[in-house]
């Protein structure tokens, strides 16, 4: 039997919050494990500390880092506070929910619409109420624009070219992530694209307004596509992720068929958001239920809790 110790590894800011009792999900995890006889330790996260965790007795929980040994798992916000996940991999496209099948017929539409209506106001104020389609394609970019990474069907720059080839007379907004640090080469490449195509504009941030006015979202796997569902805007994914169930994926369909489905098959927006966020994550502010889900999830992944 494994020692009844849980170590939670956090960066300095999150560790300070957790120690002051201001990191709600960590507080729930702590209460859950202490409730079944575990000692819970909050640890400063570093590469060396994570390496040492493999040789220590007990279990390890990392914040977004790779759970690289059998006694470790990772936790990650499920896009919107206070929803969280505990997973056996840091790769979103390998999360438990990514492997599930979504059937809108199994979801109570009234319940879903009520849930989405409340959360839409909380997350985006009145933006979704005034949403419309103005002939704009919103291309939500992330990082490493010139690289073709393993979870992508092509590089982000090649993705932009595919959008240009199919946009017709629609305008194209290339949205840069405000948290990314783009290289001079990436910036110059985007500037050249915009200079050579009058339909194209480049902008940093401004996601909510872009979602309010766009016709649809194109991205590798940016959460902007999921947020777009609150504005009833469909999306195409050029990469793999956990929220793919109601979005045409280029990896499965090719660009042409994904584009055709985007324009012909509207998603079940409310049912999907309710299923994905509310029914397939851990809501940290629900006392009792959160602790039970935390323990059940860890047990499902093989922990002796």
Image (spheres, rainbow, N blue to C red):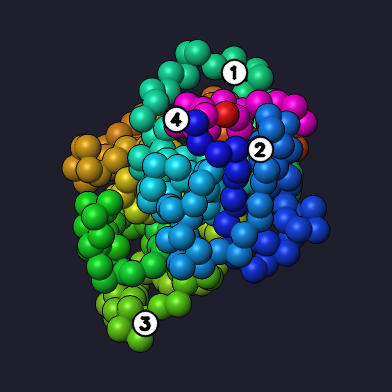
Q: Which dot marks residue 183?
A: 3
In front: label 4 or label 1:
4
Viewer-side residue, 104 vs 22: 22
Is 273 part of what is drawn in magenta? Answer: no
Q: Earlier in the sequence, mark 1 or mark 3?
A: 1
Residue density around tag 4, few if under 14, some if 14–19, many if 20 or more, within 10 Å = few
Q: Which of the 4 quarters of the picture holds residue 6? A: top right
- Give the magenta range: 287-304
Q: Pointers 4 and 2 in contact (CB under 8 A)?
A: no
In front: label 1 or label 2:
2
Q: Which of marks 3 and 2 is nearer the N terminus?
A: 2
In front: label 3 or label 4:
4
Q: Which of marks 1 and 2 is nearer the N terminus?
A: 2
Give the residue at x 22% y 52%. 153
Residue 202 locus on image (x, y percent)? 43, 72
Q: Name the residue under label 1.
A: 109
SS at mark 4? loop
Work out which residue is located at the far bottom of the displayed protein and give it.
184
Per the picture, the main secondary structure of the magenta-coloured stretch is: helix
Viewer-side residue, 18 vs 190: 18
Q: Mark 2 points at which residue?
A: 38
Query: Label 1 vs label 3: CA separation?
Result: 45 Å
Give the residue at x 25% y 44%. 250
Work out which residue is located at the far right of the displayed protein and give it.
20
Query: Label 4 vs label 1: CA separation?
Result: 35 Å
SS at mark 3? loop
Q: Earlier in the sequence, mark 4 or mark 2?
A: 2
Q: Pointers 4 and 1 in contact (CB under 8 A)?
A: no
Q: Earlier in the sequence, mark 4 or mark 1?
A: 1
């Amino acid at each position: 039997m494994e020692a009844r110790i849980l170590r939670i590894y956090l960066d300095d800011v999150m560790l300070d919050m957790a120690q002051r009792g201001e990191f709600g999900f960590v507080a729930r995890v702590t209460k859950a494990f202490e409730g079944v006889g575990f000692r819970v330790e909050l640890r400063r996260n570093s590469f060396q500390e994570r390496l040492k965790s493999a040789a220590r007795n007990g279990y390890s929980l990392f914040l977004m880092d790779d759970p690289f040994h059998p006694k470790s798992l990772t936790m990650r916000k499920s896009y919107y506070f206070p929803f969280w996940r505990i997973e056996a991999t840091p790769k979103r496209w390998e999360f438990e929910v990514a492997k599930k099948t979504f059937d809108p017929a199994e979801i109570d539409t009234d319940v879903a619409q009520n849930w989405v209506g409340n959360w839409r106001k909380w997350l985006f104020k009145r933006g979704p109420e005034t949403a419309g389609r103005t002939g704009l394609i919103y291309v939500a970019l992330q990082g490493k624009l010139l690289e073709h990474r393993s979870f992508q069907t092509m590089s982000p720059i090649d993705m932009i070219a595919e959008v240009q080839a199919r946009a017709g007379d629609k305008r194209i907004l290339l949205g840069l992530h405000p948290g990314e640090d783009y290289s001079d080469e990436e910036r110059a490449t985007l500037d050249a694209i915009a200079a050579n195509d009058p339909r194209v504009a480049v902008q940093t941030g401004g996601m909510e307004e872009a979602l309010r006015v766009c016709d649809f979202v194109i991205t590798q796997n940016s959460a902007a596509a999921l947020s777009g569902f609150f504005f009833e805007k469909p999306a195409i994914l050029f990469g793999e992720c956990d929220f793919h169930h109601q979005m045409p994926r280029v990896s499965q369909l090719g660009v042409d068929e994904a584009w055709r489905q985007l324009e012909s098959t509207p998603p079940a927006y409310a049912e999907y958001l309710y299923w994905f966020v509310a029914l397939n994550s851990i809501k940290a502010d629900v006392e009792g239920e959160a602790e039970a889900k935390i323990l059940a999830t860890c047990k499902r992944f093989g922990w002796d809790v």
